[in-house]
Image (cartoon, grey):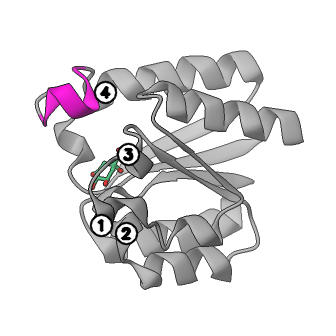
Amino acid sequence: MRLLIIHGPNLNLLGEREPSMYGTQTLEQLNTCITDEARELGIAVRCMQSNSEGAIIDALHEARLNCDGVIINPGAYSHYSLAIADAIRSIAIPVVEVHLSNTAAREEARRISVVAAACRGSVAGFGCDSYLLALRSFAKKA
Ligand code: DQA
């Protein structure tokens, strides 16, 4: 099984960005955790990060050609990007949304995810473990 992991806007600054909300782990360290867990589960992963909505949409389109699924943290795009939601609905492979923070417990604007409705499921609030739980959901479905 091959999965694409997409980290959305501002996640390149993990570790220095609002550490009380998002933790002190850098994106590189998070990607190492994801890759190690995936290896244990027999899943091949490729990780990418982009601050650009268009690049994320292009990556989703490309994933349909060479991946079995996608794990995406769309960052703030979760809350308003119908374009990313449409891209997810346009590809046949399953997509799982993840968030480091518990968005349901944050400001009102963050409680809505227009992307979540296009996904197989969502995992939020477990910090870096949100990604590992999403990986496990794919291992279970395999
Ligand atoms: C986030 C939650 C979003 O509301 C926020 O804009 C982010 C990070 C999370 O992982 O908790 O950039 O997606």
Q: Which residue is mark 3?
A: 105
Tell me the mark number nearer the camera, choosing from 3 and 4.
Answer: 3
The disc label shown at residue 40, or none: none
Q: Which residue is mark 4?
A: 28
The magenta segment: 17-24
Q: Is residue 105 above or below residue 86?
A: above
- Kindly identify the residue that appears in the image at 38 percent across and 45 percent down: 105
Q: Amino acid at mark 3?
A: Ala
Cβ of mark 2 under 8 A from ligand 1: yes
Q: Is residue 96 above or below residue 124?
A: below
**10 Å neighbourhood of mark 4: few (<14), some, or many (≥20)?**
few
Which quarter of the picture shows residue 57? bottom left
The disc label shown at residue 79, or none: 2
Q: Would residue 118 appear left or right of 82 to someone viewing this image? A: right
Q: Would residue 46 appear left or right of 63 to someone viewing this image? A: left
Cα gap from disc 3 to disc 1, whole angstroms: 11 Å
Mark 4 vs 2: CB contact within 8 A: no
Q: Amino acid at mark 1?
A: Ala
Sequence order check, earlier mark of 3 and 2? 2
Mark 2 vs 1: CB contact within 8 A: yes
Q: Is residue 42 above or below residue 138?
A: above
Cα gap from disc 2 to disc 1, whole angstroms: 7 Å
